[in-house]
Image (spheres, helix red, strand yellow):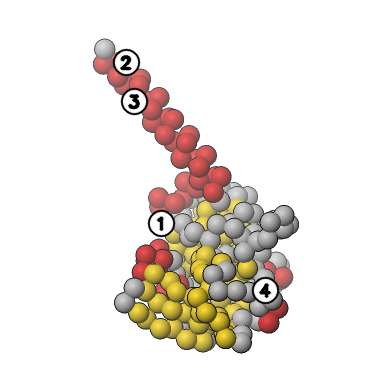
């Protein structure tokens, strides 16, 4: 489990494509290395990955093909910055919201402003995921817990306003229009929407059966 509070930025220093997936080598800031062990879980741009080896400040992770298919990790190139968060310790403060590291979908970055009082990002998600995104609701964007500030339903565009601290501590400085972003919808919201949807469909089906009698 993670909290959506990015604790540092790593630098991708090697990408090794293998038959079953890809091995990523990431250079960690020293502040995130304390107590790190093989087998530990780390959110890399919002994707929960397992440490397979490390040497000095370089840490290796394997991403299987299934993970690459549903996330934007495969877009990353050597030299890119990535958001990092170590897994939350039991009893730790949840400064953002509960994040699993299981990416729901990817979004296309359609708007970007990283300076001034109106700093924000805008993006478009696949239509089937729009039902889970609400005004003032939580989203994890590349692992950062953020709040939806504006929705343009006609265009299918979602805006998130940014404070300077978020811009400073995350890898948003590398964003370019058209980039893919990892999106994790808030789990409780998704469950609620799905349960309500199934209930409504069941009620409507029962009404149709009753009207046919």
Q: Residue furthest top?
A: 213
- Tell me the CA gap for discs 3 and 2: 9 Å
- Judging by the rendered image, the residue that carries numbered circle 2 is 210
Which residue is more in the foreground, 5 or 111?
5
* Residue 165, numbered label: none
- Tell me the CA gap for discs 1 and 3: 27 Å
Q: Viewer-nearest of labels 3 and 4?
A: 4
Q: Secondary structure at mark 3?
A: helix
Residue 36 found in image quarter: bottom right
Task: Identify the residue at horizontal 41%, vertical 56% (top origin).
Answer: 126
Q: Quadrant of the N terminus?
A: bottom right
Pointer 3 or 2: first along the chain: 3
* Residue 35, numbered label: 4
- Judging by the rendered image, the residue that carries numbered circle 1 is 126
Q: Secondary structure at mark 1?
A: loop
Whether 74 is drawn above or below 67: the answer is: below
Which residue is more in the foreground, 68 or 59?
59
- In the rendered image, residue 161, in percent from the top left (x then y), is placed at 64, 62
* Residue 205, numbered label: 3
Residue 45 found in image quarter: bottom right
Q: Quadrant of the C terminus?
A: top left
Task: Identify the residue at horizontal 40%, vertical 52% (top origin).
Answer: 127
The local crowd at label 2, few if under 14, some if 14 to 19, many if 20 or more residues have their Cα within 10 Å, is few
Pointer 1 or 2: first along the chain: 1
């Amino acid at each position: 489990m993670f909290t959506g509070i990015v604790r540092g930025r790593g630098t991708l220093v090697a990408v090794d494509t293998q038959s079953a997936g890809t091995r990523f080598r990431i250079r960690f800031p020293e502040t995130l290395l304390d107590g790190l062990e093989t087998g530990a879980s780390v959110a890399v741009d919002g994707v929960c990955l397992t440490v397979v080896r490390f040497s000095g400040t370089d840490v290796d992770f394997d991403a299987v093909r299934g993970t690459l298919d549903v996330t934007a990790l495969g877009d990353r190139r050597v030299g890119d910055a990535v958001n990092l968060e170590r897994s939350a310790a039991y009893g730790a403060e949840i400064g953002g919201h509960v994040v699993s590291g299981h990416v729901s979908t990817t979004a296309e970055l359609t708007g970007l402003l990283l300076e001034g009082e109106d700093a924000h990002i805008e993006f478009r998600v696949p239509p089937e995921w729009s039902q889970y995104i609400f005004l003032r609701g939580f989203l994890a964007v590349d692992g950062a817990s953020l709040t939806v500030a504006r929705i343009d339903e006609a265009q299918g565009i979602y805006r998130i306003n940014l404070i300077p601290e978020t811009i400073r501590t995350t890898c948003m400085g590398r964003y370019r229009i058209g980039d893919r972003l990892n999106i994790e919808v808030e789990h409780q919201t998704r469950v609620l929407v799905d349960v309500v949807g199934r209930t409504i469909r069941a009620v409507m089906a029962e009404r149709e059966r009753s009207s046919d009698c």
